[in-house]
Amino acid sequence: MKYINSPIQEINFENKQIFIKRDDLLDIDFSGNKARKFYYFLKNDFQGIKKIISYGSPQANSLYSLSVLAKIKSVKLDFYVSHIASFLKENPMGNYKEAIKNGANIIDLSKINSNIHTFEYIENYVLPFEKNCVFIEEGGRVKEAEFGIKILADEIKAWAKENSINKLDIFLPSGTGTTALFLQKHLEFDVLTCACVGDEEYLKKQFLSLNKDESKHPIILKREKKYHFGKLYKEFYEINQKLLNETKIEFDLLYDSLGWLVLKHSYNFGEKKLLYIHQGGILGNESMILRYKNKYI
Ligand SMILES: *Cc1c(COP(=O)(O)O)cnc(C)c1O
C-alpha cells in the first residue's frame, strides 16, 4: 500500500472548514472502505485457501476490491450477481471492467436459476460443494472487517492527539453500517452517519445485529426525504460537481452525495470540528456520470 496511514486534509466547502480523511488515496488498487474491511484477509495467511466467494452488484466496489485481493493472494474469485444489465455487458466499465481484468469470475445467476435469492443459492448450492474457499458476505459485512476499521480508528485518534483536537465529530455515509459501527466501537468521539442503502430502520437493525448495546451505536442523521440506492437524483450530481469545484476532490455519487446532503440538512456545523471519511468508490463514478449525462444533460 502507498500509505499505511491515509492523509487528512483540511478543506473549505460552502464556507465551512472540514477535515477529510483520504482513504480514497490509500493505494491505487486497494483503497477506500473495502480496503479497510478486507485488510484482515490481505494481512493474514490464506493457508489452503484456493478461492474467494462473494456476491453483490456487478458494479459493486467490493467486486473490484475482492478482485485485487484475489490477485495479490493468487486465488480465484467467484462473484455471484443476480443479473447483469445488457448495457454493462456490452460496454464494460468501472468496477465491473477492472474486476474482469483482474481475472474475476462473475457468475450471472439469472442464467442459472432466477427464482432464488443469490445468498440462498450460494448457501445451498455452492458452499456445500466448495472446499478450501473463504466466503465473504455482500458489501464486506463480516466480523473480520473490525480488524482494518480499528486501524482506521487508531489513525484518527493519533491525528486528533497530535493536533490537540479533543472535540471532534466523525461522519461517514453508511451502506451496511459495518464501518460506522466498528469505528464507533473503537473511538471516544461521536461517529455520525446516514442510511444510503435502505432506510434508517434498516441501518438500526444492522447495528443491532452487530452490537446489542445501543449506547455504542453511531448516531444516524436523518435524510430530508427517501432515496433509493442506485437511483439518479439531480441534487446528487449537483453536490458532487460543487464539491469537485470547491475542494478539487472527487467524491462518489452513490454514498457521498447523500452524505453531504444529509450534513447540510441535519448537522450543526461549528460546535465541534468535523472529520469526513472519504471511503473511495470513485471507480463506480464512470457509469453513474454516463447515466446522469443521459438523463439530465
Ligand atoms: C461499501 C462502501 C460504503 C458503505 O460501507 P458500510 O460499511 O457497508 O456501511 C460507503 N462508501 C463506499 C465508497 C463504499 O464502497
Image: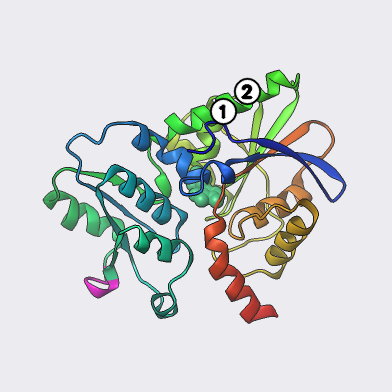
Q: Residue at x 25, y 74 (%)?
A: 111
Whether residue 8 is situated above or below residue 101 in the rendered picture: above
**Crowd tier of the residue under label 1, counting other residues whose Cα lies within 10 Å: few below 14, some 14–19, many 20 or above:** some
Number of numbered discs on residues: 2
SS category of the residue bearing label 2: helix
- Amino acid type indicated by mark 2: Lys
Q: Residue at x 80, y 54 (%)?
A: 246
User: For this view, does 159 lie left or right of residue 10?
Assistant: left
Quadrant location, the C terminus: bottom right
Q: Between residues 218 and 286, which one lies in front from this camera angle? A: 286
Magenta extent: 110-115
Q: Nearer the viewer, residue 6 or 150?
A: 6
Seen as rendered, the residue at the extreme front is: 2
The tag on residue 157 is: 2
Find disc 1 in the rendering and name its residue.
Answer: 153
Task: Decide if residue 9 is on the left or right side of residue 128.
Answer: right
Q: Quadrant of residue 233?
A: bottom right
Decide whether residue 206 is among the magenta residues. no
Specify whether residue 122 is in view: yes
Q: Amino acid at mark 1?
A: Ala
Rendering coords of residue 7 (x, y %): 64, 35
Magenta highlight: main SS: loop
Percent coordinates x, y for residue 271 in the rendering: 83, 32
Disc 2: CA contacts within 10 A as few (<14), some (14-19) or many (>=20) = some
Towards the viewer: 253 or 213: 253
Mark 2 and mark 1: Cα distance apart in space: 6 Å
Please say if 266 is above or below 239.
above
Which residue: 55% across, 38% down?
A: 180
